Amino acid sequence: MKNMLSHWDKVYKNKDHNQVSWHQSHSTISFKWILKYTQKTDSIIDIGSGISILADNLLDEGYTHLSLLELSPTAIQTTKDRLKVHTSKVNFYNENILNFQSDTQFYLWHDRAVFHFLTDEKDQQTYINKLNQYLKPQGYFLLATFATTGPKQCSELDIVQYDKDKITQLLGDDFTLIQTTSETHPHPNGSTQDFNYFLLQKQ
Ligand SMILES: C[S@@+](CC[C@H](N)C(=O)[O-])C[C@H]1O[C@@H](n2cnc3c(N)ncnc32)[C@H](O)[C@@H]1O
């Protein structure tokens, strides 16, 4: 099995950050839904935040309690440097979500293109256990994955494609689906990738 930390860290060390396939110059659906469903003081965690612009967009809107969790030291350092004027509003966790431990719970748990890399059922269950443990009651899980019409791989790794039925079945009765939509994401190389977005609320 590949060493995931070294795989992802190499990606961020060797690739132009504007050319990674998941690059966005402004967050789209995640940003819109977070604004719609949360208050600016709510605690929000972005799992596998990479070098995403989502935190910048939320800080610009006045959000004050953000947490970013990311496996790659290079990606987290790049984001720390970029957000250094906002250090009091952002917590950084450089770790694997499967080993995450925290004293706090979050009101919104965001994951864009991270959960879908968990192809092993045991890892999926560990992730879901963490989600259940660290998401507040009535809190939101905002998940973006490749759609069933999208790619089967990303960054040379296999992924699991999700649709509404598959994700609700996997999460079970603990979560209610509030909203779902699809997005055609423009890859910097000119092609496109089909994503599905799901907003689920914890019971
Ligand atoms: C396709 S990128 C998406 C990055 C970001 N969410 C975005 O939308 O721009 C996947 C990210 O998840 C991170 N990642 C992968 N597996 C992880 C894990 N088990 N724990 C934490 N981060 C992980 C990778 O390092 C990478 O930054």
Image (spheres, grey):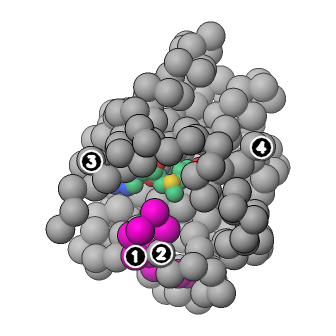
N-terminal-most mark, 2 or 3 = 3
Q: Nearer the viewer, residue 63 or 8?
A: 8
Residue 69 visible within the image: no
Q: Is mark 1 within 8 Å of ligand 1?
A: no
Question: Alpha-carbon distance for marks 2 and 3?
Answer: 18 Å
Q: Is mark 2 within 8 Å of ligand 1?
A: no
Amino acid at the residue labelled 1: Asp
Badge nearest the viewer, 2 or 4: 2
Residue 79 visible within the image: yes
Classify mark 4: helix, strand or loop: loop
Instruction: Report the residue at 80% width, 29% height from top.
Output: 61
Question: To which residue does mark 2 refer?
Answer: 153
Disc number placed over residue 26 in the picture, else none: 4
Instruction: Report the residue at 65% width, 87% height from top.
Output: 149
Amino acid at the residue labelled 3: Ser
Q: Which residues are magenta?
A: 154-164
Question: To which residue does mark 3 refer?
Answer: 6
Q: Position of residue 112 (x, y in %)?
A: 58, 57
| Extreme residue toward the left, this view | 1
Question: Alpha-carbon distance for marks 1 and 2?
Answer: 4 Å
Q: Nearer the viewer, residue 97 or 157?
A: 157
Badge nearest the viewer, 3 or 4: 3
Q: Nearer the viewer, residue 137 or 10?
A: 10
In the image, is 119 to the left or to the right of 162?
Answer: left
User: Is 45 rendered above or below residue 198?
Assistant: above
Q: Is mark 3 within 8 Å of ligand 1?
A: no
Question: To which residue does mark 1 refer?
Answer: 158
N-terminal-most mark, 2 or 4 = 4
Question: Alpha-carbon distance for marks 2 and 4?
Answer: 23 Å
